[in-house]
C-alpha cells in the first residue's frame, strides 16, 4: 500500500456534518489550525436537487452498518455522506432536552444521568439558537425549559397544520407553532423559507440552516481545511496509549495517509464514531480506544416513533410547508410514567409537508395499497392528506450496542459496524399510548379516515456516552475521553439519554461547550 | 436503451411486476431506472433500497427476480411473464402477505415494498408525476432528468 505522511496539524476533526463543521468553525475562529477529514465526496448547493429521487445521493454511502433488533431499520435514511453530512438533509426540528431528561437515573431509577444538568447547558442552547437561527415562539411554548426568546417568529401555519390543529383543540390538548432552524424572515444573510416542502432534498437557498451555507463559510473563512474522500480507519496513540498522535485515513486511490495532530476530535455520525473507536485498537487499548470502562458501543438508542395519518375533509395542500413539521405539542412530556408499565416522554410533531414518494411520502403511508386502489388513494391524498409523528423515548440499555462484525468487511478489509437495538417493553407501551392519543386527536378533527403506521426508529444516539465515572462512561461532560486526554468526541453518540426530542439542538449546544473548553485549555491540551 | 445488468427477460419481468403495483410503471421506465442504478457505484444510486442494508444492490434485485419466477413456476408451472394478470396478482398478494411458498430470499414482503417504491418513484415522484396528481412541483433546483 502506498503511504503518505503529512505535516502535523493542531486539530484534526473526523466528519464534516453539523457537529464537525460547527466545531471546525468555532476552533478555527479561535485561532487553531484545523483540518477536517470527510469520508464522502465534496458537496455544493447544486447537489441539492428538488427531487426525493435525487436526494438519495445525499444519504449514507459509506461502509455497511448491519442491524439487529426492532429499533434499527432504515439506518441510512438519517445518515449523510459527503460535505455537510446529514446536515444537508435534516429537517431543522429544534428542541431542548427537559431538566428531567438529564437525571433519568436519579429521578426514575432508569437509564443514566448526564454529568451536567440543564442549567449547565442552557447558555449554550441559547447561543446555538442564535448561531443556527431558530424560528419559534417561546411565549406560546409552555413546555420547554427556561430559555432566551428565539431570534425569529414562527413560520406561517400551513393548511394541513390548521386541519390538524382543529383536532388538538377539540381534544383539549395544546399545540403550538414548531421551533425550527428554518428562517421565517431573512436572517444573517440567509433568505426566508418559501414553504415548498423540499427540506430533506436539501435547501440550496439556505433558509434551512445547513453546513454549506452556515458553518463551512465560517470555518473556511477562518482558515480551516477540508479534505474529502478521506476515509479515517484509525486513531493512533503514543506507546503508552495516553495521548492521541493523529489519525490514519485512506483516499479513493487506496493511498494510506498518516495525519499527526495535537488534538483529535471524532465528530462523525453516531455509528461511525463508535466504529472508529472500536477499530482503533493497540497494545494499550486492546478493547478499542477509550474503552477501559468496557462501555464503548453500549447504551445505543433511537427514538421509538410512529406516524398517524388522516384524509381530512378540507383540502390540506400537503406538499406545502416544511418537512420537519409546522406544529408541536409536548403536553405531558414531563410525566415519564403516564401509565403503569409505560415509560418515557413524548413529543408530537405535526403537519409535515409530504411529497408523493419516498420513505416519508404519501404513498408509503399506505404500503398495503397497490394498483388502482393506490392510484385512487394518491389522487385523494395529494389534496387531503395530513400526518403527525409521535417521538417517544428509548431507555438506554447496556445490551443495546454497536459492535464490530468481522463477517462483513469494508473495501479496505476492516470489519463493519453492527448495531443491536431492541426497544424496552415499557417504551413500547408508551408508544402505544401515543398511537391511541394521536388517532383520537385526528378523529376529533372531524375525519373518520384515520390510521397509523408501524414502530419506526428515529435518530441514532449513544454508544460513546459521557459521564462522571470513568468506570461507567467513555467521556466527561466535554466529550473528552477519560482514557486519552487529547481525544474528544462530538455528536449525539455522547448522549446518556435521548429524551423524546430531536437531538440537533443538544448536539449543537454540546459542540459549542466543548469548543469553549478546548479554547480555554489550549496550552494544557496541546502539550 | 440497452440494459446493463438485467437481461431482457429480467427487465421485462421487473417491468411487469411493477406495473401491477403501480399502473404505468413499465411505460415510465422502471426497469431502466433500476438497471441504471444497480450498474453504478452504490453511493451514486438513486434507489429507495439505499435506506436499508441489503447487500450489493444488483444481487438484491437479481435475487428478487429469481424469487418471482421461482414462485410463479411453483404455483403455475411457468415463469411470471407467461402468467395472466389474475395469476400475477396471486404472486403479488402472496408476497405482501408473506405467504410465498417457494420464494424465500430476499424476503418477498420487503421486495414488494422496495419494488413498489421504485414504481412509485417513476410514476408519481417525477415532475410529470406531480403534475398528474395536480401537485405543484415548486422546485428550487429542477432535476436535469427525472432519474
Image (spheres, coloured by chain):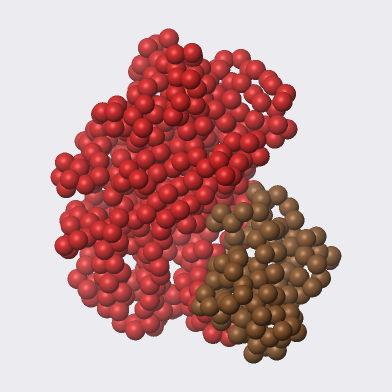
Q: Residue at x 84, y 65 (%)?
A: B2
Residue A17 visible in the current orientation: yes
A272 on left or right of A291:
right
Q: Residue at x 52, y 21 (%)?
A: A236
Name the quadrant containing residue B45.
bottom right
Residue A519 visible in the current orientation: no
Q: Residue at x 59, y 56 (%)?
A: B54
**Chain coloured brown in this rendering:** B
**Chain coloured red in this rendering:** A
Taking depth in this image into account, of A478 and A222 the one nearest to the observer is A478
**Image quarter hosting the N terminus of chain A:** top right
* Residue A91 percent across, percent down from the top left: 45, 53
**Image quarter hosting the C terminus of chain A:** top left
* Residue A27 percent across, percent down from the top left: 45, 24
B11 on left or right of A241:
right
Taking depth in this image into account, of B29 and A407 the one nearest to the observer is A407
Labels in figure, total: 0
Q: Residue at x 65, y 49 (%)?
A: B43
Taking depth in this image into account, of A247 and A116 the one nearest to the observer is A247
* Residue A485 percent across, percent down from the top left: 38, 19
Name the quadrant containing residue A434.
bottom left
A330 on left or right of A351:
left
Q: Look at the picture and state if A379 lies above or below A395.
A: below
Amino acid at each position: 500500500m502506498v503511504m503518505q505522511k503529512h505535516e502535523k496539524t493542531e486539530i484534526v476533526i473526523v466528519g464534516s456534518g453539523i457537529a464537525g463543521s460547527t466545531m471546525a468553525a468555532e476552533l478555527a475562529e479561535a485561532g487553531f489550525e484545523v483540518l477536517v477529514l470527510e469520508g464522502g465526496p465534496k458537496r455544493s448547493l447544486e447537489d441539492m436537487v428538488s427531487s426525493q429521487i435525487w436526494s438519495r445521493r445525499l444519504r449514507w454511502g459509506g461502509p455497511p452498518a448491519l442491524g439487529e433488533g426492532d429499533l434499527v431499520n432504515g439506518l441510512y435514511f438519517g445518515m449523510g455522506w459527503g460535505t455537510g453530512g446529514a446536515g444537508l438533509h435534516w429537517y431543522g426540528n429544534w428542541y431542548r432536552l427537559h431538566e428531567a431528561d438529564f437525571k433519568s437515573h436519579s429521578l426514575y431509577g432508569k437509564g443514566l444521568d448526564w454529568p451536567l444538568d440543564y442549567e449547565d447547558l442552557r447558555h449554550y442552547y441559547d447561543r446555538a439558537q442564535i448561531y443556527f437561527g431558530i424560528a419559534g415562539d417561546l411565549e406560546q411554548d409552555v413546555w420547554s425549559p427556561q430559555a432566551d426568546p428565539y431570534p425569529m417568529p414562527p413560520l406561517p401555519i400551513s393548511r394541513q397544520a390548521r386541519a390538524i390543529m382543529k383536532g388538538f383543540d377539540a381534544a383539549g390538548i395544546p399545540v403550538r407553532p414548531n421551533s425550527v432552524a428554518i428562517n421565517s424572515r431573512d436572517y444573517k444573510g440567509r433568505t426566508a423559507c418559501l414553504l415548498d416542502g423540499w427540506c430533506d432534498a436539501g435547501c440550496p437557498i439556505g433558509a434551512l440552516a445547513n453546513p454549506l451555507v452556515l458553518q463551512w463559510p465560517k470555518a473556511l473563512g477562518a482558515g480551516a481545511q477540508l479534505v474529502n474522500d478521506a476515509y479515517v480507519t484509525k486513531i493512533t496513540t503514543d506507546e503508552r496509549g495516553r495521548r492521541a498522535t493523529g489519525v490514519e485515513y485512506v483516499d479513493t486511490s487506496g493511498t494510506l495517509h498518516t495525519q499527526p495532530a495535537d488534538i483529535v476530535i471524532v465528530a462523525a455520525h453516531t455509528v461511525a464514531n463508535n466504529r472508529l473507536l472500536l477499530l482503533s485498537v493497540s497494545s494499550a487499548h486492546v478493547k478499542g480506544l477509550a474503552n477501559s470502562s468496557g462501555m464503548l458501543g453500549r447504551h445505543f438508542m433511537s427514538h421509538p416513533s410512529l406516524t398517524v395519518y388522516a384524509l381530512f375533509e378540507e383540502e390540506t395542500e400537503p406538499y406545502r410547508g416544511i418537512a420537519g413539521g409546522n406544529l408541536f405539542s409536548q403536553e405531558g412530556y414531563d410525566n415519564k410514567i403516564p401509565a403503569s408499565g409505560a415509560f418515557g416522554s413524548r413529543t408530537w410533531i405535526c403537519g409535515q409537508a409530504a411529497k408523493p414518494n419516498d420513505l416519508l411520502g404519501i404513498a408509503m403511508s399506505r404500503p398495503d395499497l397497490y394498483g388502482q386502489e393506490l392510484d385512487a388513494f394518491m389522487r385523494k391524498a395529494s389534496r387531503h392528506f395530513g400526518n403527525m409523528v409521535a417521538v417517544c423515548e428509548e431507555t438506554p440499555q447496556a445490551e443495546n450496542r454497536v459492535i464490530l462484525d468481522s463477517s462483513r468487511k469494508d473495501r479496505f478489509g476492516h470489519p463493519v459496524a453492527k448495531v443491536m437495538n431492541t426497544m424496552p417493553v415499557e417504551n413500547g407501551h408508551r408508544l402505544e399510548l401515543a398511537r391511541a392519543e394521536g388517532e383520537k386527536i385526528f378523529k376529533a378533527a372531524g375525519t373518520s379516515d384515520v390510521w397509523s403506521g408501524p414502530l419506526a426508529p428515529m435518530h441514532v444516539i449513544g454508544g460513546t456516552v459521557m459521564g462522571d465515572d470513568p468506570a461507567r462512561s467513555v467521556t466527561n461532560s466535554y466529550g473528552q475521553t477519560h482514557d486519552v486526554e487529547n481525544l474528544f468526541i462530538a455528536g449525539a453518540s455522547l448522549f446518556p439519554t435521548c429524551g423524546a426530542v430531536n437531538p440537533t439542538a443538544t448536539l449543537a449546544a454540546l459542540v459549542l461547550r466543548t469548543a469553549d473548553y478546548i479554547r480555554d485549555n489550549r496550552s494544557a491540551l496541546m502539550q | 436503451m440497452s440494459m446493463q445488468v438485467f437481461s431482457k427477460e429480467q427487465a421485462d419481468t421487473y417491468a411487469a411486476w411493477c406495473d401491477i403495483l403501480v399502473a404505468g410503471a413499465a411505460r415510465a421506465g422502471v426497469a431502466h431506472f433500476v438497471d441504471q442504478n444497480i450498474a453504478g457505484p452504490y453511493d451514486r444510486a438513486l434507489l429507495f433500497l439505499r435506506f436499508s442494508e441489503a447487500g450489493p444492490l444488483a444481487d438484491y434485485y437479481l435475487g428478487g427476480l429469481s424469487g418471482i419466477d421461482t414462485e410463479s413456476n411453483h404455483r403455475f408451472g411457468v415463469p411470471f411473464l407467461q402468467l395472466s394478470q389474475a395469476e400475477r396478482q396471486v404472486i403479488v398478494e402472496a408476497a405482501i402477505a408473506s405467504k410465498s411458498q417457494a420464494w424465500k430470499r430476499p424476503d418477498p414482503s420487503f421486495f414488494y415494498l422496495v419494488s413498489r417504491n421504485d414504481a412509485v418513484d417513476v410514476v408519481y415522484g417525477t415532475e410529470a408525476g406531480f403534475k398528474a396528481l395536480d401537485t405543484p412541483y415548486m422546485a428550487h433546483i429542477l432535476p436535469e432528468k427525472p432519474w
